[in-house]
Amino acid sequence: MAEKLKLRKGDRVVVLSGKDIGKEGEISRVIPERRMAIVDGINVARKHQRATRATAQGGIIDKDMPIPVSNVAVVCPSCGRPARVGHRFEPDGTKVRICRKCGGDL
Ligand SMILES: [Zn+2]
């Protein structure tokens, strides 16, 4: 069974390796079966597109490409640093993600 991803859509993440190292962005989509995520403004591929009937105009199109989730870390809103994700349980049993560094909720 695949390990559940600790990241989800809307998370603010920082890139840990690759050409966008150190950059931050928001996750716009996670692809659990590939263990990849698409992050706004990260791993942008410039595609030269020829004008077709469908697109009407050609030119250069920026497209965010998926990157492996292992290459990003959630930025903790409390301490502002890349967080190692832990969990705690609310009294009602709800699982809450926490930053293992400062204990703040993610
Ligand atoms: Zn923290």
Image: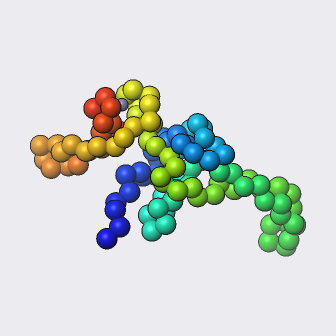
Rendering quarter of residue 61? bottom right
Residue drawn 42% across the image and 52% down it: 8
**Residue extending furthest toward the bottom:** 53
Residue 56: where, in percent of width, then height?
85, 66
Q: Is residue 78 above or below residue 49?
A: above
Residue 42 visible in the shown view:
no
Rendering quarter of residue 90? top left
Ligand 1, image quadrant it occupies: top left
**Residue extending furthest toward the top:** 79
Q: Is residue 17 above or below residue 82?
A: below
Residue drawn 56% across the image and 49% down it: 39
**Residue extending furthest toward the left:** 91
Q: Is residue 49 above or below residue 16?
A: below
Location of the C terminus by quadrant is top left
Residue 70: where, in percent of width, then height?
47, 52
Residue 52: where, in percent of width, then height?
85, 71
Q: Is 100 or 10 nearer to us in this picture?
A: 100
Residue 21: where, in percent of width, then height?
60, 41
Rendering quarter of residue 53? bottom right
**Residue extending furthest toward the front:** 17
Location of the N terminus by quadrant is bottom left
Coloured how? rainbow
Residue drawn 44% across the image and 41% down it: 74
Residue 49 visible in the shown view:
yes
Residue drawn 48% across the image and 54% down it: 69
36 vs 58, left or right, is left
Q: Is 28 or 104 nearer to us in this picture?
A: 104
Number of marks drawn: 0
